[in-house]
Image (cartoon, rainbow, N blue to C red):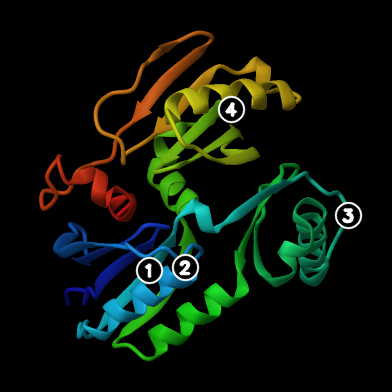
Amino acid sequence: MLPLWRDKVRFVLCKDRLIVLHYQSGRRPHILSKQVFPYKGQETGWQPMVALLESVLKDIEWKATDAMVVLSNHLVRFLVLPWNEALLSGAEKMALVQHRFDEVYGEASADWEFRLSEGSFGTASIACAIPQKLLNQLKAIFENSSLRLKLVQPYLMTAFNACRSELGKEPTWFVLAERDNICVGLLQNGQWSSIRLRHVVSDWFEEAMLMLEREALLSADGNKYNKVFVFAPETSGLIKVQRAPWTINQLKLNTPPEISQAEMPNYAMAAAGM
């Protein structure tokens, strides 16, 4: 008997728009519909974007559909936690995560929910923090919709999973460009050893190069590695690949046939890893 593939829809929450990509899952996913809803209000923060999502969901009547919400890196905070030899329970690990976020972000972290992705033995772990109220509201509005919320994931994780096979195991820098935001991280043996996010207002590539220089100086081993993988599907055209001392490799996103090259920058965050 052939498997029954459920339709899926990805909602990408950015600070200035909501991206919706509805597709039929299976061995060869097929996009059924796509749309970008710009946010034109003056309010900042995640609340207006969730309100926009709620209004869009009221007009959707898809049945037997699983939903995934991808959060722009503007909405998430990350920390890399060094290897800890102590044998800790799950509760103790999360208490340690909260303590580290409190140290870095202070009172702002009191209302965040934390997730921990542990590395392999002897390696660092990555923790992320998302506003608790944001998660609660997402769950509430999907409970009142015809869609079933299956996953809420930061864009960094979506992009990394889409590129993982091309990154290999050698130590490398990973640069993720998003509108007005860049992330620079160091990967060693496929595990994160540092992550840094930064808001940008001008040339994202130049900002990324400056971040690389700083991160290499701050990292104990970072100045030994010069291989860089750049994932910037929201930008058009090729990036500069000659930039000493870095060896820059531009990662490409496979373009679904239903999305033209001209449209791809608008839907890249939703199509990554589809």
Which residue does the image show at 14% across and 41% down from the upper left? 262
Q: Which residue is mark 4?
A: 211
Which tag is nearer the camera, tag 3 or tag 1?
A: 1
Looking at the image, residue 46 lies above or below residue 214: below
Q: Secondary structure at mark 1?
A: strand
Asked which quadrant contains residue 40, the reply is: bottom left
Return the residue at label 1. Answer: 68
Give the residue type that dot 1 points to.
Answer: Met
Earlier residue among tags 4 and 1? 1
Judging depth in this view, the residue of 63 and 217 nearest the camera is 217
* Badge number at residue 86: 3
Disc 4 to disc 1, how far (Cα)?
31 Å
Identify residue type, mark 3.
Answer: Ala
CA–CA distance in space, label 3 to label 1: 35 Å
In the rendered image, residue 265, in percent from the top left (x then y), is placed at: 25, 43
Q: Quadrant of the N terminus?
A: bottom left
